[in-house]
Amino acid sequence: ASRLDAVEQAPPDPILGVSEAFKKDTSPDKLNLGVGAYRTEELQPYVLKVVRKAEERMLAKDENKEYLPIEGLASFRQATVELLLGADSPAIQEGRVAVLQSLSGTGSLRVGAEFIAKFMPGTVAYISRPTWGNHKNIFADAGVEWREYSYFDPESIGLDFEGMLADLQAAPDGSVVLLHGCAHNPTGVDPTKEQWARIADVLQAKGHLPFFDVAYQGFATGSLEEDAFAPRYFVERGLEFAVAQSYSKNLGLYAERVGAMSFVLSEAGAAQRVLSQMKRIARAIYSNPPVHGARIVAEVVGSEEMFGEWKGEMEMMAGRIKGVRQDLYDALVEINPDKDWSFVLKQIGMFTFTGMTPQQCDNMTNKWHVYMTKDGRLSLAGLSSAKAAYLARAIDDSVR
Ligand code: PLP
């Protein structure tokens, strides 16, 4: 007997647990459309060529493995905030951004949530319904109460914009509002530029603190700049905000855990103090961030030639996903022309949000060997053109 016999088995993770089940399936037809990770047309993981090139240059430099400062690699932090806001952003030039290199999107969100728990006690975080499954865990484990705001309208398979604004209006003044910077996960539905303006009006009027989660910069439109519209616009509007960034998807650095947690504030002094407190939080969790991925980012963004190559590969990845999105749509229309499948084309980013029930998702997996999350989300980044017709048959069979 163990003293820990009372510890119960935790349930598998709703997203990463899907990959574990996929590995055990021996069917040749099996498809892993659970996790949002880019695959090639051959359904193999992809290391960006520009990443390999950066790594070769790094190896040649023979750099050491000393600890980074708690706040991370200076050139990485600079590159990362410039990627988000643009190098000429007044917020950067006036030194009003506190940037902490952290453990990819998740670790950055967690540091942000810990900061809110510590310095904005009692503040509620509002998250979209639905959202990425881990948001709730992150805020709850940091001790921040979360509630949901309306986001998705299943009727139109679009944004429930009026519902969203009404919920943000009804939230207590000074709440935290988590927003997906672009390519909303899981719905693939983003506000338009005009809608962002009205969202900003409400946030400003209510004194809410926007907290952007930017995990897919480049995957909405294929352009890193275009996809940074919302945070750049918020700077223009004079809003203070928090933002978590990740290089998992756009630079394919999933396992390197590279990202940043930043606060864009109205004064340089506040930014300095906030950074000092984020460092205290990070110090007690993981001390300082890993160096390898940060050096890759600094190499790529620091060379005009490699930055250009990255943009090219980003467009290629986003383009392949758009291509299989179209293939899937065409195959669905061919199988069942009477049904409206237009949502597949309307949604953007890595996913398609099908509206399937958990039972229908079970049919996808048990009968068709298609692995997906139970919220009806399919990662098109894991689909090939060759398998699009098979997936269409599985979907059509499951929703009948
Ligand atoms: N935020 C969203 C919306 C995501 O979809 C993801 C990954 O799937 C993340 C954050 C964080 O990913 P990572 O911790 O790998 O950067």
Image (spheres, grey):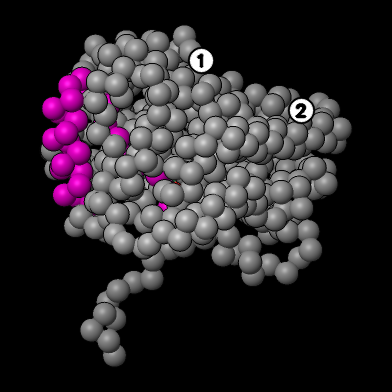
In the rendered view, tell whether residue 140 sits above or below residue 269: below
- Residue 240: x %, y % from top left: 25, 22
**Separation of marks 1 and 2 at Cα, in angstroms:** 27 Å
- State the quadrant of the C terminus: top right
Which disc, if any, is residue 192? Answer: 1
Towards the viewer: 49 or 64: 64
Q: Residue furthest front?
A: 61
**Mark 2 residue CB less than 8 A from any atom of ligand 1:** no
Q: Quadrant of residue 260?
A: top left
In the rendered view, tell whether residue 63 sits above or below residue 383: below
* Residue drawn at point x = 38 percent, y = 19 percent: 88
* Residue drawn at point x = 78 percent, y = 59 percent: 29
- Judged by depth in the image, the label closer to the viewer, 1 or 2, is 1
Towards the viewer: 221 or 121: 221
Q: Which element type, helix, strand or loop, lies under badge 2?
A: loop
* Numbered marks: total: 2
Which disc, if any, is residue 353? Answer: none
Q: Is residue 400 left or right of residue 242?
A: right
* Residue drawn at point x = 44 percent, y = 30 percent: 83
Q: Residue furthest right?
A: 334
* Residue drawn at point x = 63 percent, y = 62 percent: 22
Q: Residue furthest bottom?
A: 1
Q: Amino acid at mark 1?
A: Thr
Can residue 126 be seen here? The reply is no
In the rendered view, tell whether residue 122 sits above or below residue 285: above
In the rendered view, tell whether residue 79 sits above or below residue 365: above
Which disc, if any, is residue 339? Answer: 2
Find out whether the residues at labels 1 and 2 contact each other: C-beta distance under 8 Å.
no
- Residue 19: x %, y % from top left: 58, 60
Q: Amino acid at mark 2?
A: Lys
Q: Which residues are magenta?
A: 257-282
Q: Which element type, helix, strand or loop, lies under badge 1?
A: loop
